């Protein structure tokens, strides 16, 4: 299988390129922007995620022999366009919000500058990555807020496409989760991994006690034992009998979790295991986690809801041209005006106003030319844009495991800036307003 990412692309991207090469507009300089018109599900903020992963994929956006043969065999583009694609390398520039940053309606998450030919064919891949990862990160952040500092583990690999599962684990870690069950996410992105045993392990053995003794012999008394394969109360007694007072933890995957957790905590304490932790799983989402806030739960494992964006599997981001060069070489801001799908033309700079350590506004400065937009950061504001690619040269600082760690740290910092109303789970207006200024 080819390592190229070039065909992770909608056909019309290449047919537009083909036509632009024919009519002479392919080399017109353009500015494209990736943004969201609104926040999915009435949420109060979004979390930008996927930038580092996207940059790594764009490095492999090359049309090799296999890709060109497919395009030729299926008559997707002309022979002259095949020649152009054979030598394609992105030579433009990409800037945007740092991964892990919070965003709001209209936030220019990525700005892609280059020729029309350079930029138009990146649309599908950019949206595929950013829509998925931002949706997962936004759901993960809400779950992290609901957990109130208790550890969260991502356990959704079996509920997602195998590659989406790795991306989801990465995005969840950036937005506040502490570990994943997915080993590839650990290898590729440096996400801490966790996991001990499933119900199959207990069912394999003749008795629950045999299963627990074997697990403790293999992993030590500090392991976490799954106690709900049969009777939970008996499972607790067996776990303590096998592992003693140093039993690390128990996991509950069924039942009325608030009631069961309370009973298990009491039972553990009565048996002399006050330090044994309780982890709960079983189809949790942010609302179920919030409902467990007063329960004696020490950690959560989340699967299906997380990897599907907790009901919103896409961030509803779009990729639009916002400025272009005219036939005479002048820059022209362009705007889509269709009802319900309007865009804001022109170049953008984004800032966040912060007063006394709390964010108050998203400020987007628009301009009719690239020179006009490059102005100093307003006093009391924080610049939101960084450079990912400059004239075809990638900045690797945002990629790989190091990029994930930096994005996670950045997310924690910027989430702490948000006003208290941003932390509520109910549907409402965005936590801070978006203000447009014209240069």
Image: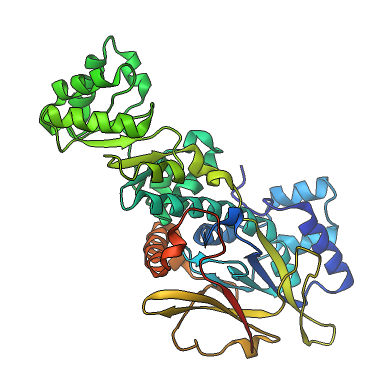
The reply to whether residue 181 is in sight is no
Quadrant for the N terminus in the image: top right
Circle count:
0
- Can the viewer see residue 25? yes
Q: Which residue sits at x=41%, y=58%?
A: 404
- Residue 411 locus on image (x, y percent): 41, 63
**Of the pair 362 and 373, the residue shown nearer to us:** 362
Give the image quarter of residue 287: top left
Q: Can you give x and y, in whole percent of width and height, for residue 80 in the image?
A: 83, 62
Q: Residue 208 falls in which quadrant of the image? A: top left
Q: Nearer the viewer, residue 421 or 13?
A: 421
* Residue positioned most to the right: 23
On the image, the x and y values in percent for residue 269 come to 15, 32
Task: Give the colour scheme shown.
Answer: rainbow
Q: Is residue 241 left or right of residue 390?
A: left
Give the farthest residue toward the top: 206
Rendered position, 281 above or below 138: above
Position of 320 relative to 158 (above/below): below
Residue located 43% across and 78% down the image: 354
Identified at 19% across, 27% down, the residue is: 267
């Amino acid at each position: 299988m080819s390592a190229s990412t070039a065909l992770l692309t909608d056909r019309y991207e290449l047919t537009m390129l083909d036509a632009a090469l024919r009519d002479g507009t392919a080399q017109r300089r353009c500015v494209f922007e990736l943004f969201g018109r609104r926040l999915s599900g009435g949420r109060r903020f979004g979390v930008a995620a996927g930038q580092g992963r996207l940059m790594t994929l764009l490095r492999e956006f090359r049309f090799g022999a296999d890709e060109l043969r497919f395009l030729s065999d299926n008559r997707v583009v002309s022979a002259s366009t095949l020649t152009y694609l054979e030598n394609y390398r992105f030579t433009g520039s990409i800037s945007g919000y740092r991964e892990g940053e919070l965003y709001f309606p209209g936030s220019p998450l990525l700005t892609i500058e280059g020729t029309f030919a350079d930029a138009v064919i990146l649309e599908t891949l950019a949206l595929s990555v950013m829509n998925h990862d931002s949706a997962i990160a936004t759901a993960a952040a809400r779950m992290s807020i609901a957990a109130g500092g208790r550890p969260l583990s991502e356990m959704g690999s079996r509920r997602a496409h195998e590659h989406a599962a790795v991306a989801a684990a990465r995005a969840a870690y950036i937005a506040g989760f502490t570990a994943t069950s997915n080993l590839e996410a650990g290898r590729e992105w440096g996400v801490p991994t966790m996991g001990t045993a499933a119900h199959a392990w207990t069912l394999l053995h003749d008795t629950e006690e045999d299963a627990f003794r074997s697990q403790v012999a293999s992993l030590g008394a500090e392991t976490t034992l799954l106690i709900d394969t049969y009777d939970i109360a008996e499972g607790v007694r067996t776990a303590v009998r096998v592992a003693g007072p140093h039993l690390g933890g128990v996991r509950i995957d069924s039942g009325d979790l608030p009631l069961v957790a309370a009973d298990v905590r009491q039972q553990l304490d009565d048996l002399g295991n006050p330090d044994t932790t309780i982890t709960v799983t079983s189809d949790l989402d942010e609302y179920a986690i919030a409902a467990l806030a007063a329960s004696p739960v020490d950690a959560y494992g989340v699967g299906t809801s997380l990897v599907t964006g907790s009901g919103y599997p896409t961030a509803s981001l779009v990729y639009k041209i916002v400025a272009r060069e005219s036939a005479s070489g002048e820059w022209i801001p362009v705007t889509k005006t269709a009802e319900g799908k309007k865009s804001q033309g022109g170049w953008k700079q984004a800032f966040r106003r912060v007063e006394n350590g709390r964010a108050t506004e998203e400020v987007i400065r628009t301009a009719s030319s690239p020179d006009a937009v490059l102005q100093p950061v307003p006093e009391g504001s924080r610049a939101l844009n960084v450079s990912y690619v400059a004239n075809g040269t990638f900045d690797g600082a945002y990629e790989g495991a190091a990029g994930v760690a930096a994005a996670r740290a950045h997310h924690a910092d910027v989430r702490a800036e948000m006003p208290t109303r941003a932390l509520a789970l109910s549907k409402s207006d965005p936590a801070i307003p978006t203000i447009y200024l014209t240069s």
